[in-house]
Image: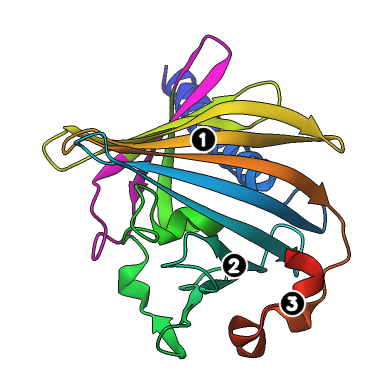
């Protein structure tokens, strides 16, 4: 009887270990599909911000992205073209693994480069319903992941922050496409369990062999309002170099890549 009990315990422990490994592997693959297509990438973006009173503002910008290490460190450069109140503004991220990212914002009206504090990573990205952290992605080691279901061709994964300081949500649930590991929807909940924000992939296309989100939407569920981002002229492996992602180019953009 004792021997049977030990065997059952062993199987339970082994099953839990395999299950945990499976969740981490799903999250790792989803993160890779979302942010590491090609060695680098370039895209035009049209951002439509709609507030709770249905008023619209449109921003247009370009995003450059370079992967320093596959599945690891990356650098992002965002250059704003329209409207005039944000034109020539630029934003840069050095995505670090295992520690806070480094972020800078250049304000041309003041000719000022401002370092964005790590505590501001969950702040609104240029007045939209996306946050700064959405641009480069949240570190997969920042959360505890649980596979809570599989439904209609999606993995359903609950993510709980390990550190809650400076985080406006208590948990978020992500639906990941089982065919290509693309995260298609995320729902954010507060401490009371109320839904506060959603992010959805509205359109996904195959570009150069990589599943790519070409339209996404962030919605403020409680206060109202939403932001839609539409991506165009998406290109991978264009030959970006590391020197572009420096303070020099925040002030003077690399014209060959943003024209």
- On whether residue 166 falls in the magenta region, the answer is yes
Q: Position of residue 136 (x, y in %)?
A: 55, 59
Determine crowd level at label 1: few under 14, some 14-19, many 20+ residues with C-alpha closer than 10 A: some
* Disc 3 crowd, CA 10 A, few/some/many (<14, 14-19, 20+): some
Q: Toward which corner of the image does residue 148 lie, by quadrant?
A: top left
From the image, tell me which residue sits under label 3. 254
Secondary structure under tag 1 reads strand
Residue 27 on image: x %, y %: 57, 41
The reply to whether residue 189 is visible in this rendering is: yes
**Where, quadrant-wise, is the N terminus in this rendering?**
top left
Marks 1 and 3 sit apart, C-alpha to C-alpha, by: 27 Å
Q: Secondary structure at mark 2?
A: strand
Identified at 41% across, 51% down, the residue is 143
Q: Position of residue 83 (x, y in %)?
A: 47, 59
Q: How is the image coloured?
A: rainbow
Rounded to the nearest whole Å, what is the CA distance between mark 2 and mark 3?
10 Å
> Depth-wise, is mark 1 or mark 2 nearer the camera?
2
Q: Left or right: 247 with respect to 110?
A: right
**Label annotation for residue 79:** 2
Residues tagged 1 and 3 counted as in contact (Cβ below 8 A): no
Q: Nearer the viewer, residue 195 or 72?
A: 195
The image quadrant that residue 208 belongs to is top right
Looking at marks 1 and 3 on the same chain, the residue that comes earlier in the sequence is marked by 1
Q: Which residues are magenta?
A: 149-171
Which element carries disc 3, helix, strand or loop?
loop
Mark 3 and mark 2 in contact (Cβ < 8 Å)?
no
Nearest the eye: 18 or 235: 235
């Amino acid at each position: 009887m004792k021997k049977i009990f030990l065997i059952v315990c062993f199987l339970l422990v082994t099953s839990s270990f395999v299950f945990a490994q499976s969740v981490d592997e799903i999250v790792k693959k989803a993160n890779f599909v979302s942010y590491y297509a090609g060695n680098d990438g370039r895209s035009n973006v049209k951002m439509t911000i709609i507030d709770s009173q249905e008023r619209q503002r449109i921003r247009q910008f370009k995003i450059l992205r370079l992967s320093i290490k596959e599945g690891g460190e990356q650098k992002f450069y965002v250059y704003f073209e329209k409207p005039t109140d944000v034109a020539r503004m630029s934003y840069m991220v050095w995505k670090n693994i295992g520690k806070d990212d480094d972020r800078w914002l250049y304000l041309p009206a003041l000719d000022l480069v401002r370092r964005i504090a790590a505590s501001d990573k969950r702040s609104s990205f240029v007045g939209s319903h996306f946050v700064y952290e959405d641009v480069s992605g949240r570190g997969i080691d920042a959360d505890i992941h649980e596979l809570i279901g599989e439904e209609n061709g999606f993995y359903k994964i609950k993510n709980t922050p390990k550190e809650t300081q400076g985080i406006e949500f208590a948990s978020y649930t992500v639906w990941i496409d089982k065919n290509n590991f693309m995260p298609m929807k995320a729902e954010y909940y507060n401490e009371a369990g109320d839904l506060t924000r959603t992010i959805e992939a509205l359109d996904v296309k195959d570009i150069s062999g990589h599943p790519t989100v070409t339209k996404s939407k962030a919605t403020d569920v409680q206060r109202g309002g939403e932001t839609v981002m539409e991506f165009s002229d998406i290109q991978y492996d264009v030959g970006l170099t590391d020197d572009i992602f420096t303070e020099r180019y925040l002030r003077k953009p690399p014209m060959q890549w943003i024209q």
